[in-house]
Image: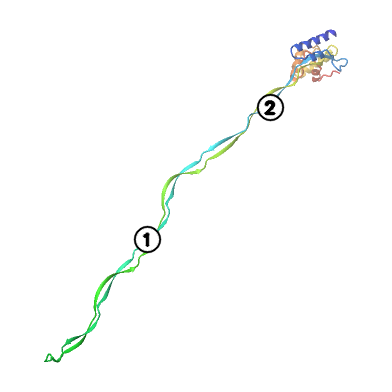
Amino acid sequence: MIKRSVTMTLLGLALVGAGRLSAQEAVAGDLLPPNAKPGECYARMWAPPQYRTATERVMVKAESEQVQIIPARYETVTERVLVKEASSRLEVVPAQYGTETEQVLVKAAYTTWKKGTGPIQKVDEATGEIMCLVEIPAEYKTITRRVVKTPATTREVAIPAEYQTVTVRKMVEPAREVRTTIPAEYSTITKTELVSDGKLEWREILCETNMTQGRVRDIQLALRQAGYDPGSVDGVIGTGTMRAVNAYQRAKGLPVDPYLNVATVKSLGITLR
């Protein structure tokens, strides 16, 4: 018992030197397994740190927005444009003239006495003079004159608008913005997280005190049924049996020890009590 205690203490000090165990834990290594029962055997073993692999979705690039400018669209068109607006002007219509012929009185009619002759000529000039009252007709003169037939007037003349056909470049669609949302980019990373620190712990094992040949044979048969060849089923824990035990432990995630721990035995379905 003293030799075993010294061995475990030396193991604890060695782990302290390797940085895998604190001094406090090394001192605790001198303690005996707690709550042990008669017939149980324990080995103080180093339980390495436990890690787990976790995946995490992390954002690589934040969401952003892309702005695209769509330029204005133009077309060449032919159109009729107003050069001069419609207007009006006043136009003088000249008078219309004609000619008229008119008899103009030059000398009015009158009566005068004129000497006349009768059927019988007088013999004596001194007697028998004949005087006749004669009507002298009026004298007229024909004149031609220019007269206004239609007087001068004014009229409004409409002047139509003036147009010109031209070719122009016309905007059909104005420039505009197109905004596109660029989603955030994510990546899945794998990281290893520490679940528990490494430590020294007591593990219940099979030893000469609680191991029988029949129990070892049961363990060998259970290993073979589970697909792990222990070699000969002879009730002896040899190299082949421990190789199969360690392979089973690794596959099941059990502690891989140089001893046959009770956790492995129970996993194989072997009852110890």
Instruction: Locate the N terminus and report the quarter of the image it occupies.
Output: top right
Sequence-wise, which precedes: disc 2 or disc 1? 2
Q: Where is residue 180 in the image (x, y as percent from the top left)?
A: 59, 36
Which disc is residue 220 wearing? Answer: none
Q: Where is residue 152 in the image (x, y as percent from the top left)?
A: 35, 65
Residue 116 image-quadrant placement: bottom left
Which residue is nearer to you in this view: 191 or 25? 25
Residue 33 left/right relative to 160: right
Nearer the camera: disc 2 or disc 1: 1
- The residue to which callout 1 is attached is 91
Q: Residue farthest to the front?
A: 126
Instruction: Locate the C terminus and report the quarter of the image it occupies.
Output: top right
From this view, report whether residue 86 is shown above or below residue 230: below
Secondary structure, mark 1, is strand
In space, the residues marked 2 and 1 are separated at their CA atoms by 97 Å
Dot 1 alpha-carbon crowd within 10 angstroms: few under 14, some 14 to 19, many 20 or more: few
Residue 152 left/right relative to 233: left
Q: Residue at x 50, y 44 (%)?
A: 172
Residue 216 image-quadrant placement: top right
Residue 144 left/right relative to 209: left
Which residue is nearer to you in this view: 105 or 57? 105
Q: Which residue is drawn at 69% across and 26% down?
A: 55
Q: Position of residue 64 (x, y in %)?
A: 61, 33
Disc 2 residue type?
Glu
Which residue is nearer to you in this view: 8 or 93? 93
Dot 2 alpha-carbon crowd within 10 angstroms: few under 14, some 14 to 19, many 20 or more: few
Disc 1 residue type?
Glu
Which residue is nearer to you in this view: 135 or 112? 112
- The residue to which callout 2 is attached is 56
Secondary structure, mark 2, is strand
